Image: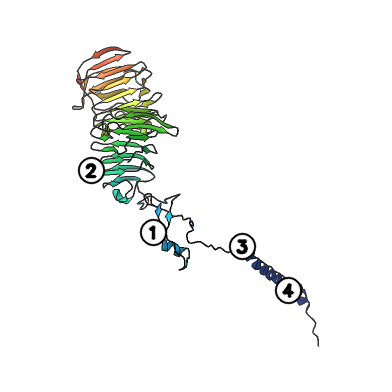
Amino acid sequence: MNMPIPSRTKSLLPVATLCCLGIIGFAIVSTIVLALIPIYIKAKSFSLQSADAFYLQYSADADADSSVTGTVENLSDVGKSLGFGSDAEITSGQAQATFVRRRKPIGFAGESSTFQFVAIRSGAFNNPLTWTDGIVPYGSCSVVISAGVAVTLADPALFIQMKKCDIYGSLALGSGSSSFQFHYATTIIVRAGGAVQDLTSNKNILIPASTFLTLLSGGGFCAAGTIIQAYSSVGVGESVTRTSESGPFTCGILPSGSLLSYNKVTFIAIQSGGFTAGSTFLGGLPPSSDICSRGGCGIQIESGVTLSTADLNGQMSLQIDEINLNVLGSLKFVGSGGGIFIPSSSAFNFFGGGSFTSTFASAFIQVFSLTTGLSIGTPEILGSSFTEPYFITISVGGGFLISVNGVAGSDTTTMVNPVTAGMMG
């Protein structure tokens, strides 16, 4: 007895048929593809004659001072990694590095908390043991070389962005016949007892724009005959030759590439601004008592720059024995006084084109004694503005020797009045 097929089952038969046909078709296509693979894709194999050379490409991180180029020693390991059997043997190999990269600097033990790196042991610059916490300087940082510590940088260049370097010990630069080159602008302060040594045979130090080097009295910077030279992407520029290893000495490369040098610690104002603002001065270094207290210091105001006393709040105490103001720009007195207090044996010079202005009609210069803090003589009244060449030399006794447009005069009054040692705004 034949049972009728339910209508629901009849409706599923076409779907089942299509599924079966699809599976059969996929199996046929897969069989054809697998059969064609050996024809179109050759097996990866190679055959070598006994004396044939073959080449491998390998990528890895390496230390900057590692020896990558040379003879390969671990030949058996290379053969094993290539899957060579016992019937094949590599008898010699040479390695040639075409590209070396490092993911992190030598001695990198984590991120520095201050980005100030202090050398505490004598040794190579790139030796972690030289530095506090075992971290070699990297990135945009400041460096301090402690007293009694000798650090050697034998490479022909410094590639890190060393914003500032205080040297109380010694720093030896370069080796061989290559000039030593600072790749980034830097500020280097060589303190009393510190020294920078040039170990290159051609005695040439290359520094870029916006670099500021100053050598305090009692410090040393390279031997006599060493050439300090500005450079840029277009080549080398102006230079100065050291005539003596000892200080004081200052060399600065302006943003324009011009080189300025002085046999004195000199701060160079390159941008209009306040007296205490680092941005006002080349190298980000404003005048300070710890630097000026050894041998005095000078201030150079570049053309078109206005140095304002507004941020002095009436007084800036500098325990120094000499100030030279070579004004090519403008000195502006703003504050509670309108005067500048400077010690004896100083010079206060406005060159042609220089000027000063004051919010007070009676801006003045007053000499004082560093020993007693008392004023010496009567103040020299400058008025509220002045634009002509104006030169004042102050004798040891406190008298003024004044020259205006080449006409000299003098005031040797020695009346003593109490005054606080400092510079008034």
| 347 versus 148 height, above or below | above
Instruction: Please state which amino acid type lies under the numbered disc 1.
Output: Glu
Mark 3 and mark 1 lie on one chain; the one further toward the N terminus is 3
Foreground mark, 4 or 2? 2
Residue kind at label 3, given as amino acid type: Ile
Name the residue that disc number 2 marks: 148
Query: Could you tell me if residue 335 is visible in this image?
Result: no
Upstream in the sequence, badge 1 or badge 2?
Answer: 1
The amino acid at mark 4 is Ala
Q: Position of residue 131 (x, y in %)?
A: 30, 48
User: Helix or strand or loop: what does disc 1 sit on?
Assistant: loop
Q: Residue furthest top?
A: 407
How far is mark 1 from mark 2, CA to CA?
Answer: 42 Å
Q: Residue 134 location, x and y as percent?
A: 31, 51
Q: Count neighbours of disc 3 (C-alpha within 10 A) and say few if under 14, some if 14 to 19, many if 20 or more.
A: few
**Which residue bears the numbered disc 1?**
73
In three-dimensional space, the C-alpha distance between marks 4 and 3, rounded to whole angstroms, equals: 37 Å
Count of numbered tags: 4
Residue at 29% across, 21% down: 348
The x and y percentages for residue 188 are: 32, 36
